[in-house]
Image: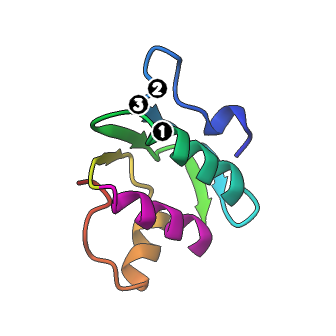
Amino acid sequence: MTESQAQPAGEENPRHLVPTGDLTIFEAGEFKDALVKLFTNEGLVSMDLSGVKRVDTAAIQLLLSARKQQRMLVAGMPDELQGKLTQLGFTGSLSE
């Protein structure tokens, strides 16, 4: 995930994040920064994960932490991410 890929999709919609590529320990810092920026917006925010190719537990930890804000909609859940969440015992939705 490059810095531009971690930014909200277009300045016209700062409440929407579209990460692409890998979300691993190597991209965790950028991803965290993008999530913090996303949640500076009031109200409901959204994230499209359809462009994510690889995830690890560092990214999953950040996603589950973001879920605790209880105001995030998640779309485009990759099969790999859903599989890893299931393996870790998480059966809920990332969306609130």
What residue appears at the point 71 percent right and 67 percent down from the top-left corner?
25
Q: How many marks?
A: 3
Q: CA distance from mark 1 to mark 2?
A: 7 Å
| Residue that protrudes farthest toward the top in the picture | 12
Residue named by callout 3? 15
Residue named by callout 2? 14
- Amino acid bearing label 2: Pro
What residue appears at the point 57 percent right and 74 percent down from the top-left corner?
57
Residue 39, position in %: x, y? 43, 42
Are discs 2 and 3 less than 8 Å apart at CB? Answer: yes
Element assignment for label 1? helix
Ranked by sequence position, the earlier of labels 3 and 1 is: 3
Classified by dominant secondary structure, the portion drawn in magenta counts as helix
Q: CA distance from mark 2 to mark 3?
A: 4 Å
What residue appears at the point 38 percent right and 46 percent down from the top-left corner?
76
Residue named by callout 1? 38
Residue 1, position in %: x, y? 70, 46
Using residue 11 as the reference point, say whether residue 93 is left or right of it. left
